[in-house]
Image (spheres, rainbow, N blue to C red):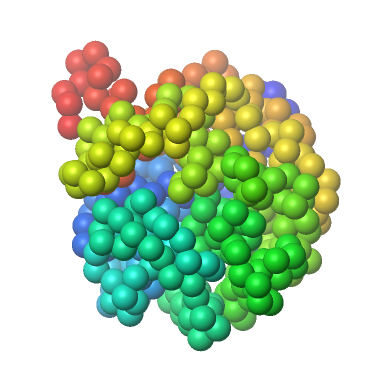
Amino acid sequence: MNPDLQRAFSPARLGKLPLKNRILKAATYEGKAPDGVPGQALLNFHKAIVGGGTAMTTIGYCATEADGRINDQMLWMDEIHRDALTHLCNELKAHAPDARISGQMAHCGNFSKNRRLQRLQRPLGPSRMFSMLGASAGYPNSGAMTMQDIDYFVSTYARAATLMKAVGFDAVEIHFSHGYGLSQFISPKTNRRSDEYGGSLRNRMRLPLRVLEAVRKAVGDDFPILGKMGLTDGIKDGLHLPEALDVATMLDSAGIDALICSGGTSSFNPMVYFRGDTLDKGLIAVEKNPITRLGLRLVGPRLFKHYPYRENFFLEEAKQVRDRVQCQMVYIGGCTELDSLATVMREGFDFVQLGRPLIKDPNYVNNAMGNSDYLNGCIHCNRCATLIEAPGGVYCPLNDELPGKQPA
């Protein structure tokens, strides 16, 4: 086997956590927790991943509170889910004893259409803004967080991290990107504050760094914390690479164990991180709310811009981050085929996160280790991503279209 591929499939340590190889499941919201409860569908999805040889799977979008969900079907970290979360972690480790589990900690901020707000009257972000997504749920305008709201926001991460470690997660990933709550503070596009949480990048990073500090205090020094950060928002007046390099430096100095460099925003330009076929037609097909469906028809062509797919599409920018930090680096972005995986390893990245390739083939690692000519088969149609709110959640439609396979 190619020495670079040998490295990819060899044991490594994420911080102090031993992993059997360097392949990690990326956090992709699965849409498999009806009413926010982690049940059998979510368990089965991740069982396939860990059973297929992936070293660590990531439970996507674990909201830090009920009001941190984008919609009311998302999982949130709360004591009422302690038993279900413990069962999830125990079953995954029983199924694949050498696999590890991470959970992506996220909060939607003002990017929400959650109709079951518990604490808030409407979604809150760094600044008051119009929200097309929120309009479909009766929240056309999001509010601006007060100082008390900011303190509470930080506390939700601390409580969630404490619970996640207690129920059996082996690591946590803090979502600093893609236009969600923390990203809204980092980006000059969405953060229009004039106090100590707005203006300069140092001020815009104040809340994210407080969150990292609170999570570290909750889980301890030996528990790995990964951070998914943005290389660019992909929009005018947003975050771009020069500031992103400084964001990486700040997170590194604050003690993050590993950085994952992505880009784009779900609210303004999601195709930066999807690449390939656009999402609008698929989302319109599964959307039940007529207001949201109309909005998608009107703004879809502008929101879902076409970026042709190419392998390792974030590599050059991620290398610039690699050269600025001391922490470990996790590559994400178009690493589908084995030649691309070898390239990323040769460039010195510590780990690779795979999303769509593992949805297409959960047995990716086992298959690739046994076949040097392995081809994954993902065609980057992005149909899987359009199913997050469809009955049953995310799966690869291509697998149902294989000869002799009955549709799910």
Can residue 351 be seen at all in this image of the molecule? no
Left or right side of 367 for 245: right
Instruction: Reply above or below: 302 against 141.
Output: above
Where does residue 183 sit, x and y in percent of width and height?
57, 58
Question: Which is nearer the eye, 307 or 171?
Answer: 307
Quarter of the picture holding the C terminus: top left
Quarter of the picture holding the N terminus: top right
- Residue pushed farthest bottom? 148
State how many labels appear: 0
Left or right side of 47 for 28: right
What's the residue at 23%, 46% (across, down)? Answer: 291
Question: Which is nearer the eye, 216 or 266?
Answer: 266
What's the residue at 41%, 65% (across, down)? Answer: 142
What's the residue at 58%, 31% (across, down)? Answer: 335
Instruction: Reply above or below: 347 against 114.
Output: above
- Residue pushed farthest right? 323
Where does residue 386 sit, x and y in percent of width and height?
32, 36
What's the residue at 31%, 75% (across, down)? Answer: 121
Where does residue 208 sit, x and y in percent of width and height?
62, 68
Instruction: Reply above or below: 100 against 123.
Output: above
Can residue 58 be seen at all in this image of the molecule? yes
Instruction: Reply above or below: 216 against 300.
Output: below
- State which quadrant residue 392 falls in: top left
